[in-house]
Amino acid sequence: MQAFRFDLCELPEETKGLRQEVRDFLAVELKDIPAVTRAQTWMGFDAEFSRKLGARGWIGMRWPKKYGGHERSAFDRYVVLEEMLAAGAPVGAHWIGDRQSGPLLLNFGTEEQRQLILPKVARGECFFCIGMSEPDSGSDLAATRTKAEKVDGGYKVNGTKLWTSNAHKAHYMIALFRTDPEKKHDGLTQFIVDLKTPGITIRPIRDLAGNAHFNEVVFEDAFVPDGMLVGSEGSGWAQVTAELAFERSGPERYLSSFLLLQEAIRELQTKGGVDGAREIGRMVAHLSTLRQMSLSVAGMLDRGENPALEASVVKDLGTGFEQDLPVKVHELLGIEPTLRGGNDYSQVLGYLTQTAPSFSLRGGTREILRGIIARGLGLR
Amino acid sequence: MNETQKILADSVNRLLTTHATRSTIQGAEEGAWPVVLWDELVDNGLTRILVPEALEGAGASWADAFVVLKAAGEHAAPVPLAETILAGFILGRAGLAMPDGVVTVMEGDFLLSEGRLSGRAVRVPWGRKASHGVALVKSGWGVEAVLAPLDYARIEESENVAREPRDTLTFERVVVETGWVELPGDALRLLGALVRASQMAGALDAITAQSVQYANERTQFGKPIGKFQAIQQQLALLSTQAAAANVAAAHACSKLDASLDGDYAAFEIACAKVRADDASSIATSIAHQVHGAIGFTYEHGLHFATRRLWSWRAEFGSGAEWADRLGRETIARGADALWPYVTGR
């Protein structure tokens, strides 16, 4: 049966030079950053680092030059992304803008919006967050209640967004608001919200590990001008669905625990002998297969095809892999995870053991993804 | 898949739908040789797909062969098509002509002396039905491909759990044809793992399709069981496992085409067998759970695929064996070499 389409995809030969260039750059930039910090990868926020990537032309790589982009291929972009993730570069600041807000504006934004925002994003100077979830709207995104009421020259917004990663550090939010309470899916609209707007209060929420990267964002009569509406009123649902395909399609959906695999191998190497070889081999086989699947999705993006279903497959398998990794290495080595002290392995394990539950929640829960896959199979 | 491969897939699937029917498969389990099916495969050149054109084969690539091997697995074709294809590849590399008829492959302890083969091979696929067996014998000088007639071999019959013949063959100074070959000494295990992983990809697709179909047809509590989220979630998981095994096997075949002068895609083949094994364990259990009691009967055909998966996952090295090898190599290369290695291949 052909429910999915995973055509094999080989990276073009000419990406090799770029890969080396990225590695050379990262070898210098990351040389003093401890493994446990690098383990944060795309959760790590470093505005200065993002500006350096912007200067190198590694943000907005596929975008048109007239918007500050570089008109590179999907494969060039893929190589840069996977090298950043595997090395544990702190790419979190620009990640959302590069991955989904920028492409969203290229697809649905006005010329003014593109001119205003995209060049700054590509320079690594303008960061985005995603305002989708709410207190009563998580997996059920269509239950969004935060209201945008039409007023003179724009919209008056009231309500609360929740779990908004990096809202406290970002410049803009792409927000999904309800513009028509009478309709469900067709009553939703996307807006660009300047987070300095009066009437917006951002409160960081500590996660179980003690980090405060996500937030509650409260809107009280916050004014969003007409010019910041994205696409058309009522088309928010369709746009969000397209955006989520981008959100789910990248190598970050299987590489979040890569550093832990690397450190586990280092532990075994130090101990000598061949204990654990079988488990490591198994993880490597899964890693390599996921990379081929992820590359296949990149190939679809390059050809302008819609990989929404295949991206869900890779994300479900990939997050399962990165989530299992801390469990597998624990079974293998039995070394206690630490917050401080210990070696790189135990610290990275400490970080990832605590973070892993989020892997199959963020960007669509495992259950939601499997629902999408089941629909693709013809079950719904 | 390119256009040629799509056409190839269509025609192989049509052939197997017509000739690898339930009664053919059941008959083969009871010892009957499916004459028509085999003759059709031969007449369409599928048994010689990897034999060079100069030796009267199709001279196709492993990427093409993947299409055929996968289809054979998908239809549970009860014939040694995979083995004959692999034997043809080895003989072609050695410049030996492939005889007509069934040719199998033999992993075993062999001694080659003055053109005569002695030794024993266990669990040879379809040994009793084959006219010839192909083996690789390593000496100080290199690796020789051996084409042995099986008329003079002693054959002890056995089967795998899919009731496919897996026989023990003993040779005593049997006159054979030989040819030096540019292949690693363990190439049969490596390439055997690849053909099994490819067949498994097909069998995994087959049980996914059967399970989805069954879930859409079987009604309980007033609706098809496929409408229940508990079932949907399991079928989604099953399908992703099948997808992963397919990508891993297809990638290994295509990588092998690119490294026939190199390391024979040893890394990718190991990954493919590990992935197919892991996928099989999850997928067969879900497929049976979704089918309920009916899938546990002989009458229902689900087991033709699941029993093959249970056998094939252990043949030519189980996932554990290949994972062990992958892991040792990974650890020996060192932690910092993993990423450059995976991306540099």
Image (cartoon, coloured by chain):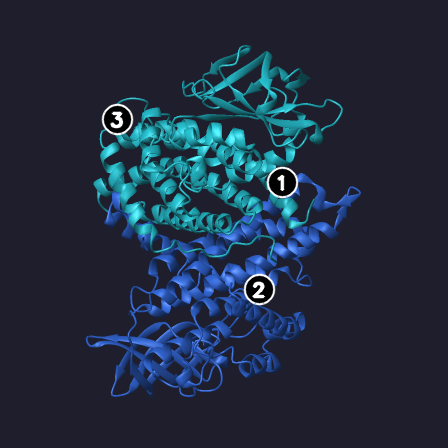
Chain colours: A cyan, B blue
Q: Amino acid at mark 1?
A: Gly
Question: What kind of element bears circle 2?
Answer: helix
Residue behind mark 2: B74
Name the mark on residue A289.
Answer: none
Task: Tell which tag, 2 or 1, sits nearer the viewer.
Answer: 1
Question: What kind of element bears circle 3?
Answer: loop
Q: Chain of mark 2?
A: B
Residue B40 in which image quadrant: bottom right
- Give the spatial CA distance, label 2 vs label 1: 26 Å
Q: Does residue B238 appear to the left or right of B89 in the view shown?
A: right
Residue behind mark 3: A342
Q: Is residue B125 or residue A263 the one in the foreground?
A: A263
Q: Residue at x 26, y 23 (%)?
A: A341
Sequence order check: which comes first, mark 3 or mark 1?
3
- CB-based contact (under 8 Å), mark 2 and mark 3: no
Q: Residue at x 55, y 10 (%)?
A: A199
User: Is the residue at mark 3 from the same chain as the one at mark 1?
Assistant: yes
Q: Amino acid at mark 2?
A: Glu
